[in-house]
Image (cartoon, helix red, strand yellow):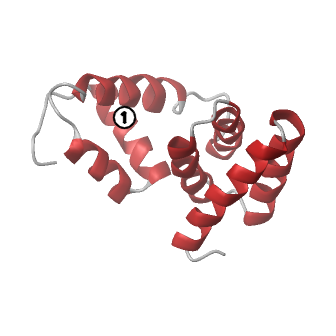
């Protein structure tokens, strides 16, 4: 990161998890693009979500990824959905399991949402060489 900022222990633990799930390149791009204005949001996401939630013992990462895909689809957050498709694959979700999640999204969030999610997931799978 070109502009280092103070980092707590929680931040460092969350950053390790964030990198493992989303990939080093994505996380570094996010941190490098951070400004003084939006750095508090990076800190909040890394400490609260990536350490406080993702590092809890109650669910494995694969389960958390599957849950996130459903929630992000329901919330219509395409950018974050794509990020978490990559994370889900990194966490051991197979392409067949991803397909089932997207069909489940169609049943509960509607066919237009599922179609958007299939398109977004296909983009990520192509980037990852899995399509």
- Is 83 in front, or is 61? 83
In the picture, residue 130 is in which quadrant?
bottom right
Residue occupied by mark 1: 13
Q: Position of residue 41 (x, y in %)?
A: 32, 25
Quarter in which the C terminus is drawn: bottom right
Indicate left or right for 70 with 83 as reference: right
Q: What residue appears at the point 90 percent right and 40 percent down from the top-left corner?
A: 107
Q: Residue at x 70, y 56 (%)?
A: 93
Name the residue at 14% across, 28% down: 36
Q: Residue at x 43, y 22 (%)?
A: 48
Quadrant in the rendering for residue 124:
bottom right
The answer to which of 46 and 131 lies nearer the viewer is: 131
> Looking at the image, how many numbered discs can be counted on the residues?
1
Q: In the displayed image of the protein, which residue is found farthest to the right? A: 107
Query: Looking at the picture, how far across and down is residue 128, in whole percent?
Result: 54, 71
Look at the numbered disc 1 and give the secondary structure of its residue.
helix
């Amino acid at each position: 990161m070109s502009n280092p900022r103070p980092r707590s222990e929680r931040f460092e633990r969350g950053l390790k998890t964030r990198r493992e799930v989303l990939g080093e390149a994505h996380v570094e791009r996010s941190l490098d693009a951070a400004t003084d204005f939006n750095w508090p949001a990076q800190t909040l996401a890394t400490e609260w979500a990536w350490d406080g939630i993702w590092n809890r013992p109650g669910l494995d990462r694969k389960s958390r990824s599957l849950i996130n895909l459903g929630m992000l689809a329901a919330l219509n957050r395409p950018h974050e959905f794509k990020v978490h498709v990559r994370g889900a694959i990194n966490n051991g979700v197979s392409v067949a399991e991803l397909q089932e999640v997207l069909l489940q999204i169609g049943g509960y969030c509607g066919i237009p949402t599922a179609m958007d999610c299939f398109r977004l997931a296909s983009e990520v799978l192509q980037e990852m060489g899995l399509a």
